[in-house]
Structure formats: C-alpha cells, structure tokens
Image: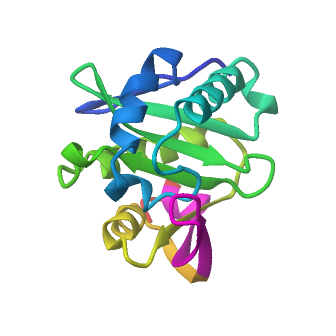
Amino acid sequence: MMPAEIRTQRLVLRSPQMKDLDTCAELLGDYDVAKMLSRVPYPYELESGRAYLTKVAENWQKPENADELAFHIDHDGQMIGCVSFKKLRATPEFGYWLGKPFWGKGYMSEAVHAATCWLFENTAHMVLAGEAMEENPASLKVLENIGFRVVGEVGCNSVSRGGSVPAVRAELHRSEFMTGH
C-alpha cells in the first residue's frame, strides 16, 4: 500500500510532510482547536509537532506495519486540517481536526467520509470508532452524518486541559457504511 492521495470535490487528503509544521503550529496553536483534541498540547510545541510529523510520515513507508496513519487535508493548495486512524492493529479510532478559519463549511464531513471509504476499501477492518467531547456537538455530528452510532459515554484525556473531559464514543460498522447506512 503506497501513501494515499484522496481527492474529493473540494479537498485533497495526502500524507503528512515536514513542510506542514508551521501550518500545524498556526492552526493547532489556537486554543479553541487544541482544547477539543486529546493529544495536542497548548501552547503548541514545535518539537512535539516535529516528532509527530516524522512518525506519521514514516508510517506511510510501511503502512501495513503502522499503528497510525494520518492524512493532511488541503483546500486550494493550503493545509487546513488532518484526519487520522489510530490503533490500526485493533479497532481503528478516528482522530480529526480542522483549523478554526475553516469551520462550518462542511470540509470535515467531506474529509471524514473520504477517509472512511479509503479505510474500508484498503483494510479488512470491520468497525471504526470515534470519540467526540460532549461540548463539541459539531464533531459528533460529523461522525453521525456518515452513519456512526453512539455506543456510550467515555472520558477523553485532554493534554491541553491537563485532564479528562466527558466524551461520547461512536462506532461505524463496515457493512452499514458500504451499503449506504
């Protein structure tokens, strides 16, 4: 499996590159974005960002052995966010974020749908999971729009907040997604 490039009507999902570091720092440096994510510190740390980009770029060299694969999202040639699959050796979990200037335009729903198609077409996974903080209904709506169903409440550790916050876990089964839910 080679590094993927997924094209949608308005977006390109592509493998992360080190040249994305400054854009990541700018977009993830906004507390309104960072506070809704589990693994992103606030303020954003360039060294952590560099280490993460190195890891996810290397994962595309041997994706069959990777535990996480990420796609950066480009719109009109500009990186605007990211979707990733963690825990690929178990039940994959979706992670995603979008820079604040790009909220409310349907970009994340478009990207999540395309990435989900890619996952189910290129792997044997039967279930995909995702979590959204309770105070982030827009994130949960992205999942629900493509057929995810809420399966429970969980605690989501937030590095930027220094603790756990209430979240909702949702799952999508391959059979439901592939038949148009």
Q: Is residue 61 left or right of residue 69?
A: right
* Residue 51 horizontal side relative to residue 106, left or right: right
Query: Is 133 placed above or below 50 here?
Result: below
Q: Position of residue 90 (x, y in %)?
A: 79, 55
Q: As rendered, which of 68 and 171 lies closer to the eye? A: 68
Image quadrant of residue 79?
top left
The residue at the point 64 percent across, 17 percent down is 2
Depth check: give the residue in front, 144 or 161.
Answer: 161
| Left or right position of 172 against 59 | left
Residue 166 shown in magenta? yes
Rendering quarter of residue 121? top right
Whether residue 11 is visible here, answered yes or no, is: yes
The N terminus, quarter of image: top right
| Magenta highlight range | 154-177
Q: Is residue 51 left or right of residue 30?
A: right
* Magenta stretch encompasses residue 85: no
The quadrant the C terminus occupies is bottom left
Which residue does the image show at 23% across and 51% down from the upper left? 103
